Image (cartoon, rainbow, N blue to C red):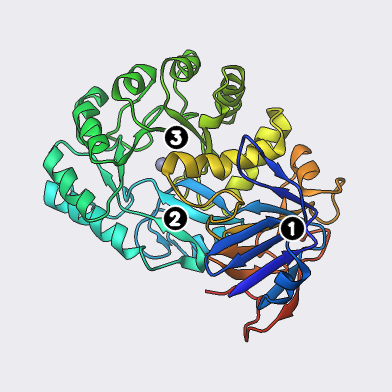
Amino acid sequence: MRIAIVNIGSIVSGDLDHPLVAGDTIVLEGDRIVAVGTASARDVEACDVVIDADRTTAIPGLIDSHVHITFGDYTPRQQTIGYLESYVHGGVTTAISASEVHVPGRPRDADGVKALAVAAHKCFAHYRPGGMRVHAGSVILEPTLTGNDLGEIAKQGVWLAKAGFGAFATAFEYAPLIAAARAHDMITTVHTGGASIPGSGAITGDHLLALKPHVSFHVNGGPTAMPDRDFSRIIVESDIALQICTAGNLRTALLCASLAERHGAFARLLIATDTPTGSGVMPLGMLYTIAHLASLGGVAPERAIAAATGSNARVYRLDTGVLAAGKAADIVLIDAPEGGTQATALDAIRNGDIAAVGAVIAGGEPRFVGRSRNTPATTRKVRVAKSAVARDFSASAH
Ligand SMILES: [Zn+2]
């Protein structure tokens, strides 16, 4: 399918270095973006579907890098089905599993741990709930695993490893397995802050600096924060990515963002939700944290959006999260919510409002055009101006 989005008010790229792009048109072909900014009338005419953005704002599909995926579109923790499809209505087009820790009765032995990671990875390879791309199968590091075990599952496609819930006496003991996971080219992540479930201990600055993971999971606490003094140590003494989560400590999320700005490390700041957990299912969690950073933390809205898109994509090596030719065709149209005080999506976010979602395109397919089930209505009205495809894009597609 070839799609043109025309009459865009502003384009937020997701790239922190160049967060705004001039122009009013985006063209997609198949699952790729082919042009951002301008397109000839002929190119637009040749499209199967033309979406009139009505001067709303285009952003990359949001990437939630901390979702408690299990199997299917179901969370046992909150006993809710269809939550991932619901997140698509909050503008999330990519979810990264925080490891399958919430699978009831999850195994602890090496064979079971490996089988769980491989099965979760492969189950989501061709399954897109609501159109969302899910990267699952993050192996939970346990003392029963060896470096060879990690090599075996890496060959099966597993590329995420998570430390923090294994049966180790202290968190320092994860170091050899994290190093082994890195040697197999996996992205390594470490739980940060106070214990979130019984049996896991607090993990703070000393642990992170010794373990050297790619990402500090919920650096602001999941949900309990580590000591304030540890934030600047991690920022200055390491290159660990700083994932701030909606379901964490808001004060330390803002502290971490301001320290990252001060030390020139904002590119390492990632936004995620850490849901569904005890805090629940939060389809608008990404939009909340973007609004919190912009309205309370003084971060420019387009930079906060980059932390939720392009910065996540860079750290996790994904080919989405940035609006540029060749990237995945994952695009969200947002606007000032109807009845609010602000004129544009970016002004609304700066004001602390939740942006209204007017359309989501994921994997090159419009998942809905017009009205999100979860956000307020948009002020302007995104609509399908032309379609040669026998599909009703106004309803949520599966
Ligand atoms: Zn978590």
- Residue at position x 55%, y 49% from top? 321
Q: Position of residue 182 (x, y in %)?
A: 27, 35
Q: Which of the two residues, 197 or 99, is positioned nearer the viewer here? A: 99
Q: Which residue is mark 3?
A: 222
Q: Secondary structure at mark 1?
A: loop
- The answer to whether residue 124 is seen in the rendering is yes
- Disc 3 from disc 2: Cα separation: 17 Å
Label ID, residue 38: 1
Check disc 2 and report its element: helix, strand or loop: loop
Q: Residue at x 64, y 43 (%)?
A: 288
Instruction: Confirm or reject: label 3 Cβ below 8 Å from ligand 1.
Output: yes
Pointer 2 or 1: first along the chain: 1
The numbered dot on residue 134 is none
- In this rendering, is residue 343 above or below 205? below
Q: How many marks?
A: 3
> Seen in the image, is 113 located left or right of residue 88?
left
Q: Which residue is mark 2?
A: 78
Label 1, label 3: how far apart the Cα atoms are: 43 Å
What is the three-letter code of the residue carrying label 1?
Answer: Thr
Give the amino acid at mark 2. Gln
